[in-house]
Amino acid sequence: DQNNNVGSMTLYNCTGYDNLTANYRIQRTLNPGQTLTVKNSASYQGLVQLGSFAVQETNSWLAPFSVTADDFLSLDTS
């Protein structure tokens, strides 16, 4: 998280594409009792760096899922 959030975060149905450092990067330890949940999200052409505390389910970087350019209508960034 670019804002250094250490509270609870819930990311559902998100897409990360071709970001400079990582599509998803939340590694800082959360405050006690807080949770990070990432579910039904996709990452294409970028790293995913989540702390071991993250609850992850049905994301493109988890087996058996994969993402290709064919999964998108367009990847035009203009």
Image (cartoon, rainbow, N blue to C red):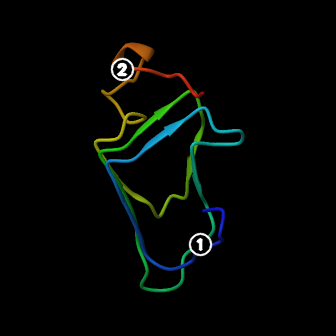
Label 1 Cα crowd, 10 Å radius (few <14 / some 14-19 / many 20+): some
Q: CA distance from mark 1 to mark 2?
A: 36 Å
Quadrant containing the C terminus in the rendered view:
top right
Label ID, residue 29? 1
Q: Residue furthest front?
A: 78
Q: Specify whether 18 is left or right of 21.
A: left
Element marked by disc 2: loop
Element marked by disc 1: loop
Q: Which residue is mark 2?
A: 73
* Residue drawn at point x = 58 percent, y = 28 percent: 77
N-term-proximal mark, 1 vs 2: 1
* Residue drawn at point x = 59 percent, y = 33 percent: 46
Q: Is residue 24 above or below residue 36?
A: above
Q: Quadrant of residue 65?
A: top left
Q: Residue furthest right?
A: 20
Please, what is the three-letter code of the amino acid marked with disc 1? Thr
Q: Position of residue 37 (x, y in %)?
A: 37, 62
